[in-house]
Image (spheres, rainbow, N blue to C red):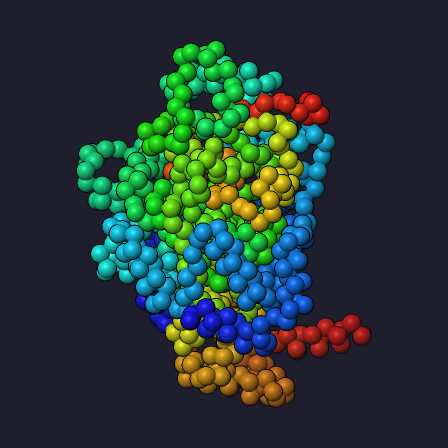
Amino acid sequence: MLATSPAFKENARRALADTGLQKALARSGPSFVARRTAAVAALPEFEQLREIGREIKNHTLANLDFYLEAYEARVLAAGGKVHWCADAEEARATVLRICQEAGARTVTKGKSMISEELGINEYLERNGIEPFETDLGEYILQLRHEAPSHIIAPAFHLNREDWEASFRKSHTELPAERVFHERRDILTEARARLRARFLAADVGITGANFLIAETGSSVIVTNEGNGDLTQTLPRVHIALASIEKVVPTLEDATSLLRLLARSATGQDFSVYTTFSTGGRRPGDLDGPEEYHVVLVDNGRSAMIGTEFQEMLRCIRCAACMNHCPVYGAVGGHAYGWVYPGPMGSVLTPSLIGVDKAGNLPNASTFCGKCESVCPVKIPLPGMMRHWREREFERHLMPSTMRRNIGLWAWFARRPSAYRLATRAAASLLGLMGRRRGRFASLPMAGGWTGGRDLPAPEGETFFARYARAQRERRL
Amino acid sequence: MSKEQILGAIRRGLRRGPLPADQAALLAGRLRTHPRQLIPARSRIARPAQIDLFIANVEKEFGTVARLPNLDAVPEAVAEYLAQQNLPPVFAMAPHPELRSIPWSERPLLQIREGRAETSDTVALQHGFAGIAETGTLMLPSAPERPTTLNLLAETALVLLRASRVVGPYEEAWDLLRAERGAGDMPRNVMLVTGVSRSADIEQTLELGAHGPRRLHVLLVEDDPDAR
């Protein structure tokens, strides 16, 4: 996927002016937050479970080489295959090879963010194999040639009228004058259309929420059931997974699953949580004959041992973006690559480079909400700060920003000069803004005042006021 | 090739070589003993309350439950349920010995086909391996006598479950599965099903009946004297 992250500011400006997107954000954002809050409140042990989730992931990452090899041994014992892929190119080629060996013409797909990261669909299409997304949200995005704007709700940015328009445009075999009375009618149409795809596909490709070393299983979590049809009906199942998805045991996965659905959709448990282990067994009446795991690194191993290692604990629940004021204002596409929101602002620079994605860690108010809701306690704001430092060290910031920060630093290191300058500025602005109490525009601050007014200072600095209060108390 | 490269990069990051034998043995022991983590208190309750919790949670997720005194009551319960839902008395059934032992001939109008589900099936009857009270979840492991397609393809999914197989947390269901098959031997597919298929992809508003069943009806046979 081509990154537009370098153009974050322009993307954000466009997003703020996009009325359809703003309508979708205003509707959906608060409901995610409310549902998670209710689910968490109903489980008194939730906070303890977060600590346990963090520990499980830390333990696994500290022994990742061991657990990956243990996992591979169990997959092989169950008759499956594991394909280790260092980068996106190798992973794409591996998927294509498996599809070609299966003589595949069409492929069905369950929702998978790693598939977006690798660009599987475009690659298969270029090589004559037709991929069909089956998750409802991913399906409409494929019809519209758009990328997901959210990691668990890919069509977060669309409104009902967009769905209806896209279905009318694409499902031309159905009567044009049909009416969609309810959302359910949209769902029913998609269900009917995709059923045929499920049955015709030669290969089914899913992602994996977890890999289990104890049993050699890959785990998917869905509400629709599309992932299960994808991995059950075709002759070949390919599970795409990045290396940090492995956990030791079923018990460990269970603890993380208790956190996942509650943090993601606010459900106690997703409708379908499915563990796949190898291919069809003797006597089985259904299920794929071949089971392949494409195990992808693509930049993860390079994060181990760095200040970004903790990011590999992420279980992709999307709580951070659901609670983020920046995501809530601009949506997911503005971030310009696969992973939006706070987790994307940390992960994207790791995977595509801080030179391309340096804007993202700056797109934060540092309110800390993301860290406080993260089910595995990833210190997201702290890591964004690390990226800002690296960006500064590598001279990637615009020169005006560097100069202004340098100017501020000069004053900050000289308290008397700092006080003198702030006193002058406060009294000047206080005087200028005395009548209206705020500024609608200020020279050199147009970017800030473009979206809001600056309240006028009262003419006195905090230091001065504090000193005065102390004096008055003593009297 | 890439395997060595990836493992090498991980070890460089961790600033060590392959794990020493004693540490590897310790981790292998953790895999073998699969210690339990914190288990929420909500399902640690007396048997009858555990069954009630299971039922309440199935219903919370838009499923339904019929409590039946024994297997003999199943044919009538199935026939009545299908009639109530205005469905034809035709279904695909898992070729499981327990389902076969049900006196279906008492309801001669029921048309039963044994095997996996096909896309033309509107109703399927599966054999439930365990019920998990914590969230009203059914554990449905695949086996020749328990085809996976029966969980997925029909619009109406019926599941027979013995009340004695209702456990509190997921961990107890994993242990039932391990006891049946031996440690580390997973069935090809284990589905944990909680309620009916749904999607919230259209305007983040919940709609029931996505790709999986629109109806989930549990036939709970009360074979557990402690549970009544």
**Residue visible at 54% across and 77% down in the picture:** B12
Residue A224 percent location from the top left of the image: 42, 41
Quadrant in which residue B111 is drawn: top left
Residue B94 percent location from the top left of the image: 45, 29
Residue A239 percent location from the top left of the image: 41, 54
**Residue visible at 44% across and 61% down in the picture:** A295
Quadrant in which residue A313 is drawn: bottom right
Near-viewer residue (A424 or B116): B116
For the N terminus of chain A, the quadrant is: bottom left
**Residue visible at 37% across and 63% down in the picture:** A91
For the C terminus of chain A, the quadrant is: bottom right
Q: Is residue B121 above or below residue A162?
A: above
Q: Is residue B12 above or below residue A414?
A: above
Near-viewer residue (B125 or A193): B125
Q: Is residue A294 above or below residue A133?
A: below
**Residue visible at 66% across and 78% down in the picture:** A464
Q: Is residue A241 visible?
A: yes
